[in-house]
Amino acid sequence: MKLVFLVNPISDRGRGRAHGQGAAARLRTNGAEIALVETQSFRQTIERSSVLTTNDCDVVVAVGGDGTANAVANGLMQTAEGIRPAMGLIPCGRGNDFAANLGLNDLDRAHEALHIGRRRRVDVGKTEAGFFLGVAGVGFDSKVARRAQRQVPLLTGSVVYVFALLLTLAELDAIPAKISYDEGFYEGPILFIVTGNTDRYGGGMRITPRASLDDGLLDMCIIKPVSRFTLLRVLPRVVRGGHLDHPAVSYAKTRSVTIESTERAELFADGEFIQAIPVKIETLPSALEVIVPNQGAP
């Protein structure tokens, strides 16, 4: 098997390079042919993965976190399906939410999955500006994502999201929104809206707990205005996905969502800025092959 590792060297507090080299050494002992390529930016990762075809390798491996996986996916999705390599993961970021949805809960399991090479087709989210793998959000949620990206560099897991949320509480302002989806329409104030291809983000926050990677649908969760106290009180329920019965929450499955507002707002997905709204978000069913453990996702 031929693999190209696209390595984010600063992931895991600068240990990304070592993770990539360690995984490559293990796989080479099992006969894999591996090229290690370090990338210096999100944009460069997209560019490097966009030119790789099945003539170059069988699998393109994202060595990093959700942002690195997002960049690799954005590059691969620019390649025609018939010559598009599969995507593998060595999860060593702060959240690793997409990897967790695939059952890649630790580095040993990720190494084993790449060695065995079992493939699974998953849906991919799409906007006018690009593609995403996990959860995309607009409103207060995107403000939290931007703060986590810029001001919370040393924490990992769901602590990153919670700490960034606490720092952003002063900006808990509703925005006017018009939201169109398959089965309905909402117009009114929202704190934020997320659309999930996976069930979790923010290092394990199960914001769209009914989402599936291969059902051809996005899970939409609208959070209507609540007080700061209520938001903090409900937050622990989000960790386990128990917030859907709250009166401020609306939830639906849909093939596409269109979000508009008279106020400027940003869409973040997989922890990365994607574009400003208005935006149409849709799902591309079974668009990408990914490498998963033998037992599949948990």
Image (cartoon, rainbow, N blue to C red):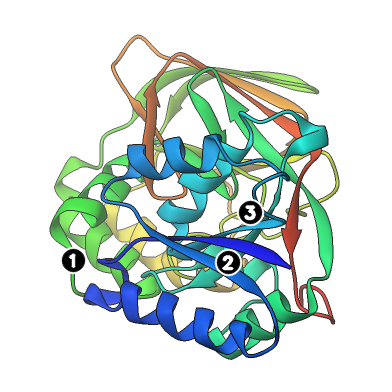
**Residue 192 vertical placement versus 87 (above, below):** above
On the image, numbered disc 1 is attached to which residue?
Answer: 153
Q: Earlier in the sequence, mark 1 or mark 2?
A: 2
> Which circle, 3 or 2, is nearer the viewer?
2
Instruction: Say whether marks 3 and 2 touch (CB < 8 Å).
Output: no
Does 239 sit left or right of 145 as displayed?
right
Can residue 206 be seen here? The reply is no
- Label 1 – label 3 distance at C-alpha: 25 Å
Q: Residue at x 18, y 64 (%)?
A: 152
**Residue 176 vertical placement versus 19 (above, below):** above
User: Residue 208 has which mark?
Assistant: 3
- Label 1 – label 2 distance at C-alpha: 22 Å
**Residue 265 vertical placement versus 132 (above, below):** above
Q: Label 2's element? A: strand
Q: Label 1's element? A: loop
Q: Quadrant of the C terminus?
A: bottom right
On the image, numbered disc 2 is attached to which residue?
Answer: 89
- Label 3 – label 2 distance at C-alpha: 22 Å
Q: Amino acid at mark 1?
A: Pro
**Residue 149 vertical placement versus 260 (above, below):** below
The local crowd at label 3, few if under 14, some if 14 to 19, many if 20 or more residues have their Cα within 10 Å, is many
Can residue 173 be seen here? The reply is yes
Which residue is nearer to you in this view: 67 or 190? 67
Q: Image quarter for residue 257?
A: top right
Does 253 sit left or right of 56 as displayed?
right
Which residue is nearer to you in this view: 131 or 252? 131
Q: Label 3's element? A: loop
Q: Amino acid at mark 3?
A: Thr
Q: Earlier in the sequence, mark 3 or mark 2?
A: 2
Does 102 sit left or right of 259 as displayed?
right
